[in-house]
Amino acid sequence: MAREQAAALAGSGKLQELWSRILFVLGAFIVYRIGTHIPVPGVDPIAIAALFEQNRGSILDVLNMFSGGALSRLSILALGVMPYISASIIMQMLTAVEPRLKQVKQEGEAGRRKIQKWTRYAAVVLATFQALGVASTVQGQEVGGASVTLITGFQFTIVCVLALVAGTMFLVWLGEQITDRGIGNGMSLIIFAGIVAGLPSAIAGTFELASSGEFSPLFVVFLMVAVVLVTAFVVFVERGQRRLTVNYARQQRGNKVMQAPSSYFPLKMNMAGVIPPIFASSIILFPASLVGFFGSESAGGVAGILRDISTKMQPGELIYTVFYIGMILFFAFFYTALTFDPKEIAENLKKQGAFVPGIRPGQQTARYIDGVVSKLTLVGAIYLAIVCLLPELLIVNYNVPFYFGGTSLLIIVVVIMDLMGQVQSHLMSQQYESLMKKTNLTGKSGGGRKRRR
């Protein structure tokens, strides 16, 4: 009886660890939400909110969605984690083409830490440029004849840049803490928390538009049905697998030759996950985060070019749609190539005495797996493009809040599925450890009885 209680306590300790991780994530969300309401020193929050409201319906709404509403308040977390994501894209691309960085990556955990450190440095540089763009464009803006900044000139620029860069790096640190001490990917969870925080106001705004007559009740029902269908479609595809049949070499046991049972190697339909649309959004939003935050006046030189790009890169524009699809396709193949190595899989199968029926082990198996993965990646990229772009037709044509867009729904669903999978893994690990301890205790007690005989 005492032994069984000890085993139960061990299992409850594992469950307690899971609860601690979940509570840590929830606590990090609370800290993040508090930070989104702390304005940059030297700005008038009411005037900033009114100014942002005047610029609704542009790519600023997408920026605001990814920042969890912090941009519309010009809080210290207004830049969000997008500078870090942009830096990650740059570092991953350089790692793929630069031999010295490839060598660093192959150093294992030490190499990973070096690349992560360089990514943080790059994030500081990008965040500084973006913060300078914010500071330069906010100054001089007025609402109702009153300036949106309480201080001006070089003093405001320094304060604004320091606050925004510090806010971004704090989010990077918070995301890393969530990854290490919580559940799931910290950066994805921060973006997820920002999107979810805006859903209640988006839903309330939709019903308010319906009550005022701008949306018909039938359209609201259609919108809700569309959200449910898109969610179901995302779940269906994310759970979809292409199973490669794998046979094992025959094994001789005594005088008999036994045929090992067949197995399968699962390949996800969408192996890149939610990374391609996040990376694509980061690339598209980068020019808009440098200039054109709140003003529309023309400018020459580099600022004018960036302003023209950010103006043309608006949801609903043809160039935006084409570029977004192209970026999703590129990052789907790029990220899959980074995270999945067919040669390594084929080599591991060969070492285990396994083979794909009809395919010779080794190089031919690697080519076969690479072909299957390429087809799956293309299907997954098309699926991502459809999910991310089709709902935006509603946003552009019917002024539906951006929180009902395909990108936001995709991030919410995929992150929730990932969290559920990790929670199930923790629970399965707890049950397995409890079972093993019970088995060991039973074996020891049985051995003791034999010795007493």
Image: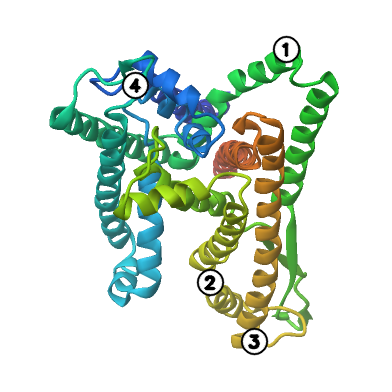
Reading the image, the residue beneath label 1 is 212
Which badge, 1 or 3, is on the more N-terminal residue? 1
Q: Amino acid at mark 4?
A: Glu
Alpha-carbon span between mark 4 and mark 2: 54 Å
Q: Nearer the viewer, residue 52 or 275?
A: 52
Q: Residue at x 81, y 26 (%)?
A: 219
Alpha-carbon span between mark 1 and mark 3: 64 Å
Bin the neighbour count of mark 4 within 10 Å (Cα to Cα): few under 14, some 14-19, many 20 and up: some
Element carrying mark 1: helix
Element carrying mark 3: helix
Percent x, y for residue 35?
35, 23
Instruction: Specify the label residue 75 is tagged with.
Output: none
Reading the image, the residue beneath label 2 is 341
Percent x, y for residue 447?
57, 44
Percent x, y for residue 18?
50, 31
Disc 4 to disc 2: CB gap under 8 Å: no
Disc 3 to disc 2: CB gap under 8 Å: no
Reading the image, the residue beneath label 3 is 364
Percent x, y for residue 386?
71, 51
Q: Amino acid at mark 3?
A: Gln
Q: Viewer-nearest of labels 4 and 2?
A: 4
Residue 160 horizontal side relative to residue 395, left or right: left
